[in-house]
Image (cartoon, rainbow, N blue to C red):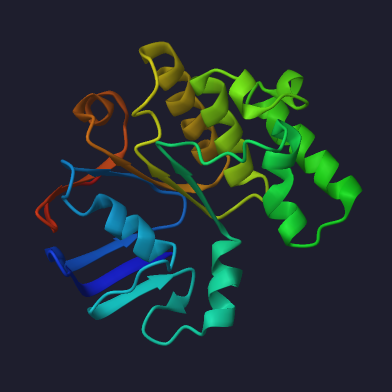
Amino acid sequence: MIRFDKVFLRYDTGISLRDLNFTIEKDEFVYLYGDSGSGKSSILKMIYMDMFPNSGTVDVLGADSSNIKRRDIARIRQRIGMVFQDFHLLSDRDIYSNIALPLELQGIKADVVRSKVTLKADELGIRSRLSHYPHELSAGEQQRVALARAIVNSPDILLADEPIAHLDEKAAAEVVKYIWKIHQSGTSVVYATHNEALLKKDPARAMTLVSGEVVKDRQL
């Protein structure tokens, strides 16, 4: 499903990733663990085809970074959901419209959009908030909205980049619980974190990154 083969990435400020070789199989839950600057976000961006290596290849859902055409990137991204530590919700749209956005961009019929949005809002406990706006919700609720938007089109892969960094302990626990539920429904999850407590608590594969290299890969 995801394969990094001899991946090397250099920023103008220095090397970000070096000689990455790993595979993430369908239905896996993988933590990318490391400090800020260790390369976690760069890996997620390359999975999303938002960044490309200087050398080596990244294969995602059968698409090869070395020869993918621009028109095919959008098709791959439709199969990938993404959530961030900053919620990236549209402040001028209500919660329903925020969740519906990926489906509307694909030209999905309104009745199908309504059904899918309602279903995901139910699953994430935010159906009563659909007519509200982001500023009317707590941080934890906003992140659940972001999760609903990320999975409303039932993606094959969910990428999570420090999604609980700005949440209090209770809200963080709820968001992690929902991400695990998403995984258990059949979605592969790649979760970037610097929170070692998550690795100790949850039965998942954990790849530890230091200065752009995988120094440990705890397989289950």
- Counting from the top left corner in percent of width and height, residue 216 is at 12, 49
8 displayed left or right of 50: left
For the point 62% across and 28% down, the residue is: 134
Q: Measuring from the top left, give residue 113's x and y in whole percent.
A: 81, 47
Q: In screen coordinates, is 98 left or right of 179?
A: right
Mark count: 0
- The quarter of the displayed image where residue 5 is located: bottom left
Q: Name the residue: 88% across, 49% down.
A: 110
Identify whether 112 is placed above or below 48.
above
| Picture residue at 47% right of the left edge, 32% below the top | 180
Does residue 136 lie above or below 20 as drawn?
above
* Nearest the eye: 189 or 134: 134
Q: Is residue 216 visible?
A: no
Of the pair 135 and 114, the residue shown nearer to us: 135
Seen from this angle, which residue lies furthest front?
92
Residue 76, horizontal then vertical, whole percent: 55, 68
Q: Is residue 99 above or below residue 61?
A: above
- Look at the image and tell me whether residue 151 can be seen: yes
Q: Is residue 219 above or below residue 91?
A: below
Quadrant where the N terminus sits is bottom left
Q: Quadrant of the C terminus?
A: top left
- Residue 218 vs residue 85: left or right? left
Q: Position of residue 20 (x, y in %)?
A: 19, 66
Residue reaching furthest to the top: 170
Q: Give the farthest residue toward the right.
A: 111
